[in-house]
Image: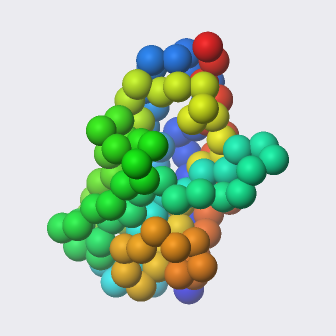
Amino acid sequence: QVQLAESGGGLVQAGGSLRLSCAASGRTFSSIAMGWFRQAPGKEREFVAAISRLGGGTVYADSVKGRFTISRDSAKRTVYLQMNSLQPEDTAVYYCAGAPWATVRLSDYDYWGQGTQVTVSS
């Protein structure tokens, strides 16, 4: 089992930045790939970014490519999502998740955090 806890959400103006963190406990951190998803009110949860087990590979949704960066620190058992040039359409609850491999498919993820709210004002 893996327990995930997100932090770092908040309110930011358009064009601003936030860094989300997700701390993992339980199973060996390096044995799972990590991803970020988001869910806006009235919309389905969607893929944002993922990083491989050892951090050598990343994948991004087209909507965030070039603005968001996913990274992981094995010593701290933490995965990060650096979000720059935020726009109102980025407003959502952001979730971190764990999977056997870095994948864009929500159904491949076995472990989920509780989410952290990100609100971008115009």
Q: Residue furthest left?
A: 56
Residue occupying image coordinates x 59% and y 57%: 46
Residue 7 appears left or right of 29 = right
Q: Position of residue 100 (x, y in %)?
A: 41, 85
- Where's the N terminus, which quadrant? bottom right
Q: Quadrant of residue 16?
A: top left
Q: Residue furthest right?
A: 42
Residue 27 appears left or right of 120 = left
Can residue 119 be seen here? The reply is: yes
Q: Position of residue 119 (x, y in %)?
A: 64, 29
Q: Position of residue 105 (x, y in %)?
A: 52, 73
Residue 66 appears left or right of 114 = left
- Looking at the image, residue 116 lies above or below residue 101: above
Q: Position of residue 106 (x, y in %)?
A: 57, 72
Q: Residue furthest front?
A: 62
Give the color scheme: rainbow, by chain, secondary structure or one colour: rainbow
Residue occupying image coordinates x 61% and y 14%: 122
Residue occupying image coordinates x 38% and y 29%: 84
Residue occupying image coordinates x 53% and y 81%: 108
- Looking at the image, residue 69 lies above or below residue 31: above
Can residue 78 be seen here? The reply is: no
Q: Quadrant of residue 52?
A: bottom left
63 and 39: which is toward the camera: 63
- Looking at the image, residue 103 lies above or below residue 45: below
Q: How many numbered discs, if any? A: 0
Q: Quadrant of residue 90?
A: top right
